[in-house]
Amino acid sequence: MRPSGLLHAQLSGLIAGLGHTDTLVIADAGLPVAPEVLCIDLALVRGVPDFVTVLDAVLVELVTERLTVARETERLNPAIWAHLLAASGTQITRSLCSHEELKHASRQARAVIRTGECSPYANVILHAGVNF
């Protein structure tokens, strides 16, 4: 057992196997997941686990060079938007797209992590970076 960090074996292994520019989606409970994309379904009940908890845990483990978020998030989910801005700080580049474009791009992800989040537009695409 690990003393800290992610305890979820499948998620930990997935992150360890990501290469530069591979993408990983952290999604709310409602984002559709294409059948050909691996879904790590963490959703237990409404709100558990929440988006912010999962995002923060993944960002500690994953070298992230960019995140992509839907423009709608800023207006329709300002709490998630504010957390994404704070979590990305100055080290992670941010790009915006429409929610439809985000759903389409998620089909190219290595995996989608489905949370129990039930607030609108609580989705992000993380683009893996390198630590050198």
Image: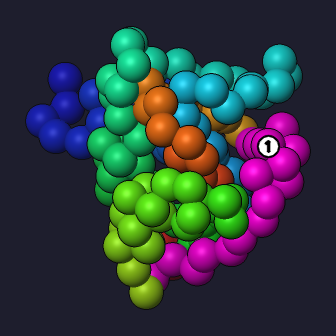
Q: Residue at x 36, y 35 (%)?
A: 50
Q: Is 93 one of the magenta-colored residues?
A: yes
Q: Position of residue 54 (x, y in %)?
A: 38, 40
Extreme residue in the bottom direction: 90
Q: How crowded is mark 1: few (under 14 residues within 10 Å), some or many (20 or more)?
A: some
- Dividing the picture into quarters, in which one does residue 12 lie? top left
What is the x, y in percent for residue 46? 39, 19
- The vertical placement of 9 against 31, above or below, is above
* Nearest the eye: 53 or 58: 53
Residue at 16% across / 40% down in the picture? 4
What is the magenta range? 91-109
Name which residue type carries label 1. Answer: Lys
Horizontal relation, residue 3 to residue 78: left or right: left
**Identity of the residue drawn at 45% across and 18% down:** 43
Q: Is there any visible trace of residue 66 in the rendered image?
A: yes
Farthest residue to the top: give it. 44
The residue at the point 45 percent across, 62 percent down is 78
Q: Is residue 20 visible?
A: no
The coloring applied to the image is rainbow
| Furthest residue in direction front, as rendered | 76
In this view, the residue in front, 13 or 8, is: 8
Which percent across, then down, holds residue 61? 38, 52
Q: Is residue 84 left or right of residue 105?
A: left
Residue 53 is left or right of residue 17, and the answer is: left
